[in-house]
Amino acid sequence: MSVAIENFVKAIYKNGMRDNNDTKPGNIAKELKISNAAATDMAKKLAAKDLLEYEKYKPLKLTEQGTKVALSVIRKHRLWESLLFKMFDMSLHDIHREAELLEHQTSDLLADKISEYLGNPKFDPHGDPIPNAKGEITTVDTSISLSNAQEGKTYIISRLMSDDKEFFDFCAQNGLKYGNTLVVSKQFSKNKMTQILINNNTILLNQDFTSIIYVNENN
Amino acid sequence: MSVAIENFVKAIYKNGMRDNNDTKPGNIAKELKISNAAATDMAKKLAAKDLLEYEKYKPLKLTEQGTKVALSVIRKHRLWESLLFKMFDMSLHDIHREAELLEHQTSDLLADKISEYLGNPKFDPHGDPIPNAKGEITTVDTSISLSNAQEGKTYIISRLMSDDKEFFDFCAQNGLKYGNTLVVSKQFSKNKMTQILINNNTILLNQDFTSIIYVNENN
DNA sequence: AAATATTTTTAAGCTTACTTAAATATTTAT
DNA sequence: ATAAATATTTAAGTAAGCTTAAAAATATTT
């Protein structure tokens, strides 16, 4: 299982989570910054290895085995993020970048040791769920994106679904952090913007950000 | 700087430490489990990159730059070993294997964070010195191999220079661990064997082992 | 010092993971 | 429904990092 293969199935898994149609070779190519041709090539190769189903011009579909590989890599990524976040004073973006490399060089044994050390956490520092050793995600995700949150309600940040440095810088500057509380003061639905109150500051967010910030109602 | 290149210069560095003549392509090939032809090929490529000096049929010599690369990888390897050893209950051999992979996927920043977290240790769990961020090994090594130790004297184990599982299993079973104390009860110099007393057990070691176990006099 | 054995090098070839360019199919817009 | 735009696929080619086989140089043994 090469790094290229692991990243390929991971990209399919992540894109597919968002939208089952976002797994066409072109989407994966864009995600991995390779050419469309390379993505088609790889898709055929992985179909031969039974990691995915490939039909010309159709979205790629991971097999059970392919999903297992993807979840294993995602597990390792999120465990590394959790460990580095806990141990070192590093930005979420830097941590993400390190985890992106370490995830491919981590035995199942080491992953389990890290998980155990951390108390088998269910979420990483972005709020993303960590699959268990069997590749199961047991947690039910009840969170919604900020773009779908209701005016006037108070929420707790549950996920920051990004790996973009600018986004994380913005989050760090404004207290947008996993577990923090905010109030949705106004939804500008026509303009697809959301005004929130956090740390006594009022911030206006556009859809680029409200679609990747997930929250839970504060019960 | 690919994984193959990093491992290549590392192998030259390590073999060269032992004996300046052990850096011929064949020695490196054996160390890395690749063919002699591949080693010669790589040597030429790295000479073009100014990482080493290559003369046909001569031992390979790292340039200053090549040495820096080797020491950077070795630093990361030993920092990972130190961290994993401290945090997790894993065998030295397993830890070595993980570090062997992680060392190539670790930014200088992360290496520094690990070092700082550990209190900038000068030695790893095998007793091997950890180069600092500049690639300097500042510690003077006064240790000698068990094969050269004097009968009757008491020593402290300072290095276990191996990555062989059987060796580490043997060490673990017999209390041969970095920092532990032993007495050299007899040197069978003709047969190149050494009898030691450790944990109230008498053990006879042959040269395979006494040449890679390093000790310091117990002053 | 010559004969033999061992190493090193060269040469040709393979696989993986890409690339670009052109052909083909699908999607979108009119 | 058709034309135009976009995406996918095919084809040909490249670089890295290996392999095996044969040729050339060096080391070892007698």
Image: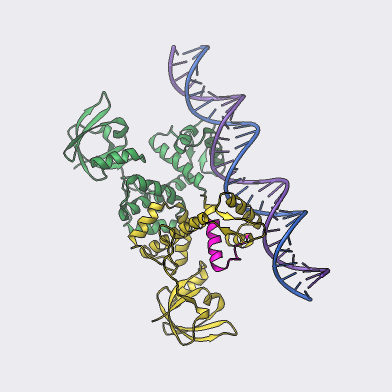
Chain colours: A green, B yellow, C purple, D blue
Q: Residue at position x 32%, y 36% from top?
A: A212
**Is B16 a magenta residue?**
yes
Residue B57 at what x, y percent from top left?
A: 67, 59
**For residue B173: magenta?**
no
How far across and down, in percent of the image, does residue B175 sit? 43, 77
Q: Position of residue B135 (x, y in %)?
A: 44, 59
Query: Residue, x 45% and y 47% (percent of image)?
Result: A68
Q: Can I make out residue B197 in this image? A: yes
Q: Which residue occupies the foreground of this view, B148 or A24?
A: B148
Instruction: Classify residue B193 as left or right of residue A202.
Output: right
| Quadrant into which the C terminus of chain B falls | bottom left
Magenta stretch, main secondary structure class: helix
In the figure, is residue B131 to the left or right of A181? right
Q: Is residue A159 above or below residue B139?
A: above
Which residue is painted at 51% across and 58% down in the image? B67
Q: Indicate whether D5 appears above or below B174.
A: above
Total marks in image: 0
- The answer to whether residue A74 of the structure is visible from this angle is no
Side (left or right) of A122 relative to A61: left
x, y percent for residue B61: 58, 59
- Asked whether A127 or D28 is in front, the reply is D28
In depth, the one of B34 and A161 nearer the eye is B34
User: What residue range appears in magenta?
Assistant: B7-24
Residues B155 and D24: in front is D24
